[in-house]
Image (cartoon, rainbow, N blue to C red):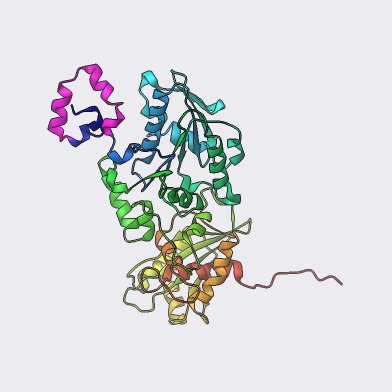
Amino acid sequence: MPADDERAGWFTTLDSPQQADFLATLDTAQCDAIRWHWEQWARPEQLPPAGAWRTWLVCAGRGFGKTRSGAEWVRQIARACPTARIALVAASLAEARAVMVEGESGILACCSPASRPLFEPSLKRLTWPNGAQAFLYSAAEPESLRGPQHSHAWCDEIGKWDMAGNRAMRAWDNLQLGLRLGDDPRAAATTTPRATPLLHRLLAGEKDGETAVCRGSTFANRANLPTPFLAAMQCEFDGTALGRQELGGELLTDIEGALWTRALLERCREAASPPPARRVVVAVDPPASAHGDECGIVAVALGEDGIGRVMADASVDKAGPERWARAVAATAAAWQADRVVAEANQGGAMVESVLRAADCAMPVRLVHASRGKAARAEPVAALYESGRVRHCGLFPRLEDQLCGIMAGGAYHGPGHSPDRADALVWAMTELMLSRRSEPRVMRM
């Protein structure tokens, strides 16, 4: 065995025969104990760094092992300090319980049976055998963190904390004001990077040593992730800016002058189930040629609450007319659309006939672009700014294109044309900006 200060990750540096040889030297009790010795299994970047930091920020891709790092850090604090009072803060109480406490990599799973804390859901409290305690909080309720005092805190997925009404920042500030027990109060924050004000604030603290930052990608943990998952993620996100964020753990920066920003799109992200839709439109931006350019196909719903929601990006790449028309018809059927909107600048009659040949049963409305893409996009971007649009999921290629449309008319995003974004703009214009005459009662 190496010296104590060299043991972190030592066991995982051995190959399989060496690990077997080492385990053969241990008795049954020792073999069982090593299962719970996190320092031997962790990668170095999953362990808290040395130094006088106040916040340890693990900012990495999905599947990196961030939750395990946070849970093991809490376990270490609770084991070493019987008087510890630890705040566990997530985007919601449900996530705090399901992920931080009861999850596959949560606190209960990380503790050996002999040292496992008692979890009292009704009290939102964990109590370790030695007296250390942890309490669950929701970042969506900032006032719940006003008053309680803690010695440590673990904040999970701060990038998805609710930003409405500045809740995320208020929750963090209230937590910091109560982080005053013990001689060295500290917090750990684990998150996939997202361009939010809170994350920018924590990263700014790296310069003066207030924040210690760990970065990493999904693929750093490939030994513990299913091969099909890794292959699917590469297929879906490879080559996209969002892939650099969600998998590579890179904080994306915005293009100055773009109509959409990453922070704006994150603010519009909706995790809850959408309300019933009044109308559903599928918009298509057909390729300019029959040689397999990208065809933008986007489904958008107008909810009963008056909010427009992006439901699907079904765009196809390198598709001829027959294939993209079938994709439009399938998307319209899947979302029970009541209309297909198609840009007709590149041969309107041909576009409609191709759609009809693909058994597109609903009405087709042909629209003609009389203005540039940026001019058409500006009113739709204003809908986002005013909170009237939601994204029901992640749409990496579509969102990359939105963030590349400039106010002045230029396009600085991926590819030579924002076909997906253009389809979204047509759909939102049809649902929320078209001036349609409504029945009215005249007063005499």
| Residue range (magenta) | 14-41
Residue that extends furthest to the right in the rendered view of this protein:
444
Q: How many marks?
A: 0
Q: Is residue 218 left or right of residue 28?
A: right
On the image, the x and y values in percent for residue 128 come to 45, 21
The one of 380 and 281 positioned closer to us in this rendering: 380
The one of 354 and 74 positioned closer to us in this rendering: 74
Is residue 142 a member of the stretch shown in magenta? Answer: no
On the image, the x and y values in percent for residue 227 come to 26, 46
Q: Quadrant of residue 399?
A: bottom left
Whether residue 407 is visible, yes or no, is yes
On the image, the x and y values in percent for residue 300 come to 52, 62
Q: Is residue 228 above or below residue 261?
A: above
Dominant secondary structure (helix, strand or loop) of the stretch shown in magenta: helix
Is residue 25 a member of the stretch shown in magenta? Answer: yes
Q: Residue at x 46, y 29 (%)?
A: 183
Q: Residue at x 45, y 65 (%)?
A: 403
Q: Is residue 282 above or below residue 10?
A: below
On the image, the x and y values in percent for residue 60 come to 36, 47
Q: Is residue 120 above or below residue 432?
A: above
Q: Quadrant of residue 148?
A: top right
Quadrant of the snapshot with the N terminus: top left
The one of 101 and 335 positioned closer to us in this rendering: 101
The one of 356 and 253 positioned closer to us in this rendering: 253
Quadrant of the snapshot with the C terminus: bottom right
Whether residue 364 is visible, yes or no, is no
Q: Residue at x 44, y 48 (%)?
A: 205
Q: Is residue 130 above or below residue 53?
A: above
